[in-house]
Image (tube, rainbow, N blue to C red):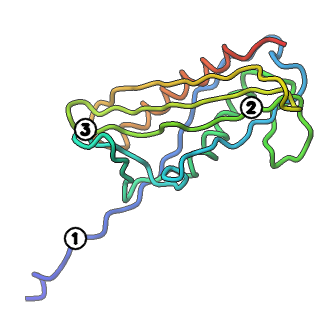
């Protein structure tokens, strides 16, 4: 009799980290001196670690997955990946984050506009949109102010298969940003 009351085990939590492919190193740094990379600003709904998605029938509604999480909040996770990417590229003599508390010659600020999966209505896809501003250290000269958006179709509806699409989109965005950083 008690077997009828048994329930299925609770779903497991899944955690995801994005790893962006490293670029080729530049022969000479584009920026003379040091570059500080700020944490990327994120809308309130995306500040947590839960992954976001939109359904085709409800495009104005942003939903959060219940059992799928980023390893860090998106602003932190993308800052870490961007720092690794720019260091590998040799874009500046040194690249730091604000937590180091040193004066830098340049500051890169960013904002996450979209980091979400779109599901239903055919093929699933991921949308990544980031904005970046590069300023001199005193903030008086804007050297770069660009928005980058990439979409990738995902083969399947599972979150796990979307991770490669996120990584590919971010690799393209970071490469475009790197190409846009002016030689100083």
Q: Give the left or right position of residue 31, taking residue 154 as reference.
A: right
Residue 147: x %, y % from top left? 57, 24
The C terminus, quarter of image: top right
Residue assigned mark 3: 56
Residue 172: x %, y % from top left? 54, 21
Quarter of the image where one finds residue 140: top right
Q: Is residue 168 above or below residue 66?
A: above
State the SS at label 3. Answer: loop
Residue that protrudes farthest toward the bottom in the picture: 1
Q: CA distance from mark 2 to mark 1?
A: 48 Å
Q: Residue at x 65, y 35 (%)?
A: 110
Quarter of the image where one finds residue 106: top right
Q: Contact (CB < 8 A) between labels 3 and 2?
A: no
Q: Which mark is residue 85?
A: none
Q: Earlier in the sequence, mark 2 or mark 1?
A: 1
Q: Which mark is residue 8?
A: 1
Residue assigned mark 2: 108
Q: Earlier in the sequence, mark 3 or mark 2?
A: 3
């Amino acid at each position: 009799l008690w077997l009828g009351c048994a329930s299925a085990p609770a779903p497991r939590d899944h955690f995801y980290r994005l790893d962006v492919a490293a670029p080729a190193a530049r022969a000479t740094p584009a920026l003379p001196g040091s570059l500080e990379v700020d944490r990327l600003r994120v809308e309130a709904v995306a500040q947590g670690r839960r992954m976001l998605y939109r359904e085709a029938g409800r495009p104005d509604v942003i939903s959060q997955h219940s059992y799928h999480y980023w390893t860090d909040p998106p602003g932190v996770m993308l800052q870490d990946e961007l720092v690794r990417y720019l260091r590998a590229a040799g874009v500046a003599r040194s690249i730091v984050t604000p937590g180091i508390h040193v004066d830098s010659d340049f500051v890169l600020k960013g904002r996450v506009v979209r980091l979400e999966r779109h599901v239903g209505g055919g093929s699933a896809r991921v949308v990544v949109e980031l904005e970046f501003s590069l300023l001199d250290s005193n903030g008086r000269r804007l050297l770069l102010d660009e928005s980058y958006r990439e979409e990738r179709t995902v083969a399947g509806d599972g979150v796990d298969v979307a991770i490669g699409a996120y990584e590919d989109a971010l690799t393209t965005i970071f490469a475009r940003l790197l190409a846009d950083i002016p030689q100083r």
